[in-house]
Image (tube, rainbow, N blue to C red):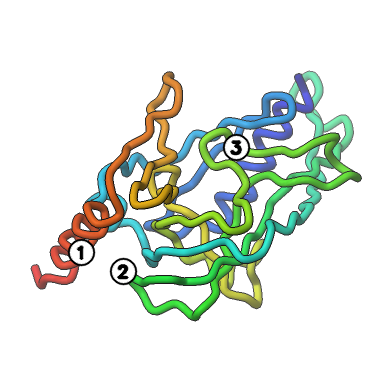
């Protein structure tokens, strides 16, 4: 139980550290070899996602995720709110390189890197750790992503360009000409919001036009 509480606090702290005023914060909760995440952003519609995104792109995975291990020393509290020791918690994060196929918002380079919670490191985990509604990317998969720019973050990207999704509704997988969202509704199984690439692109274009209009 103690270790679970430390896990929650550590991951929440790590991810909150890279949050900006408009960013999504997440509070991960580990459950064995997988994890669930409560995303602070409740954006679900294309219009809501566009309003929170710094970059919207159609991409293809060209390199497998590379896992990083972040280690944090946290106090262990005993009775009477006194620190009785410390415990090291190791958190997994993975970075995936994408080729940018098409840009709807923003001005990215030809390749971008996107961060996720989870991954695999034999010194830390027995198997792959991943978030249920944001599973690790795989090479050659195609997506339309609504992304937050966390470049310059002191923990994850002090000297590089890095992004993460707004939330799972901002991750659309591409299957032929169809697209589906990884978004989940609280307390239910995954809800796949499905449409075609053309329909989604039209919704994005309209939402971006509205966003750029002067008040």
Decide: is 146 above or below 55.
above
Q: In which quadrant will I find the N terminus?
A: top right
Q: Secondary structure at mark 2?
A: strand
Decide: is 88 above or below 163.
above
Residue behind mark 1:
205
Residue behind mark 2:
104
Q: CA distance from mark 3 to mark 1?
A: 30 Å
The x and y percentages for residue 196 are 28, 49
The x and y percentages for residue 15 are 59, 50
Residue behind mark 3:
131
Decide: is 38 above or below 107.
above
Q: Secondary structure at mark 3?
A: strand
Determine contact: label 1, label 2, CB under 8 Å.
yes
Disc 3 packing (10 Å; few <14; some 14–19; many ≥20): some
Q: CA distance from mark 3 to mark 2?
A: 27 Å
Q: In which quadrant will I find the C terminus?
A: bottom left
Residue at the front extreme, as displayed: 176
Decide which of 9, 150 is in the foreground and name it: 150
Q: Earlier in the sequence, mark 3 or mark 1?
A: 3
């Amino acid at each position: 139980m103690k270790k679970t509480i430390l896990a929650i606090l550590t991951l929440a702290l790590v991810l909150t550290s890279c949050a900006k005023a408009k960013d999504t914060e997440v509070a991960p909760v580990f459950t064995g070899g997988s994890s669930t995440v409560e995303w602070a952003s409740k954006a679900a519609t294309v219009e809501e996602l566009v309003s929170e995104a710094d970059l919207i792109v159609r991409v293809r995975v060209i390199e497998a995720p590379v896992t990083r291990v972040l280690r944090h020393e946290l106090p262990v509290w005993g009775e009477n709110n006194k620190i009785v020791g410390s415990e090291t918690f190791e958190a997994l994060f993975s970075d995936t390189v994408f080729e940018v196929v098409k840009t709807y918002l923003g001005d990215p380079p030809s390749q971008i890197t996107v961060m996720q919670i989870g991954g695999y490191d034999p010194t830390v985990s027995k198997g792959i750790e991943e978030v249920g509604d944001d599973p690790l990317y795989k090479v050659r998969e195609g997506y339309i992503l609504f992304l937050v720019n966390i470049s310059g973050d002191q923990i994850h990207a002090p000297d590089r360009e890095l992004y993460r999704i707004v939330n799972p509704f901002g991750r659309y997988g591409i299957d032929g000409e169809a697209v589906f969202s990884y978004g989940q509704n609280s307390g239910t199984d995954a809800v796949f919001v499905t449409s075609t690439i053309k329909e989604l692109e039209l919704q994005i274009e309209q939402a971006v036009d509205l966003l750029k209009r002067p008040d």
